[in-house]
Image: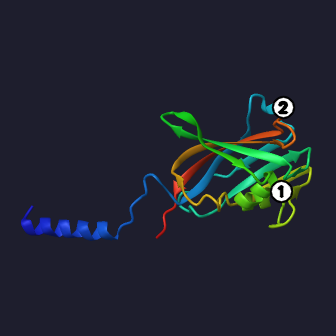
Amino acid sequence: MTCTAMAHVLATFCIVSATAKSIPSFAGPYIPVVQKIYMCGKNPSENPALFFLKVSHFNPVKPHEKQNITGNITLPFGADDSYWVQTRVDKWSGNQWKENFFVFRFPGGICTSGRANAPDVFRVLFNHTITSGPCFIKPGLYSVNNEPISWRLPNIPALPYGSYRIWCKMGQISQETVSCQLCLEVSANPEMTL
């Protein structure tokens, strides 16, 4: 290769690398993608609340397109802010789940916390459109059929990228008994802006 050809290749490489976007490797703005949702715990059949939900596949070609959710939730009890909620987030690393990567205890009760931290999930799953004031989820059967859903968490704008298992537990504040346990397997993918 002549010096002129080498200089041309080097100049092209410098121009391309100066205009290209890098892929973030650790943490930052993310696109949440849910792989599956299931009841969890030592004996999931003992959950008084039943969740049977299936999520559509994520299309990496259209990363900002919402996933669709289908299924139903049976709540034999009404849920308001007299219920506590605790979320444990495990991270997939080294071919195993590393437990307690994050632990969230939401002080406002399950209804207000759900409405504030996952507004679209709350709206789609529980037909809840009230954004302020007293919060209450009525007992009953909640069905969704191929509804588009955004998993964005407005109060968590950045996360380390990777795969997570989110373990949600809830119960009445007056009792230590767990009324419901639900697990989600999620990935936080880098959000590329052009």
- Quarter holding the N terminus? bottom left
Q: Mark 1 is on which residue type?
A: Phe
3D distance between C-alphas at marks 1 and 2:
22 Å
Q: Nearer the viewer, residue 29 or 85?
A: 85
- For residue 3, side relative to residue 156 (left or right): left
Quarter of the view holding residue 123: bottom right
Near-viewer residue (36 or 155): 155
Q: Residue at x 78, y 29 (%)?
A: 43
- Tell me the residue that label 1 is attached to: 126
Q: Position of residue 135 (x, y in %)?
A: 86, 59
Disc marking residue 46: 2
Secondary structure, mark 2, is helix
> What residue is drawn where x is 91% and y is 54%?
138
Of residues 13 and 27, which is closer to you in this image? 27
Q: Which mark is residue 99?
A: none
* Residue 51 sits above or below residue 188 on the image: above
**Can see residue 58?**
no
Residue 144 drawn at (x, y percent): 81, 55
* Residue type, mark 2 in image: Glu
Crowdedness of circle 2 by 10 Å Cα count: few (<14), some, many (20+)?
A: some
Colour basis: rainbow
Closer to the N terminus: mark 1 or mark 2? 2
Looking at the picture, does residue 106 appear above or below residue 18?
above
| Percent coordinates x, y for residue 3 in the rendering | 7, 66
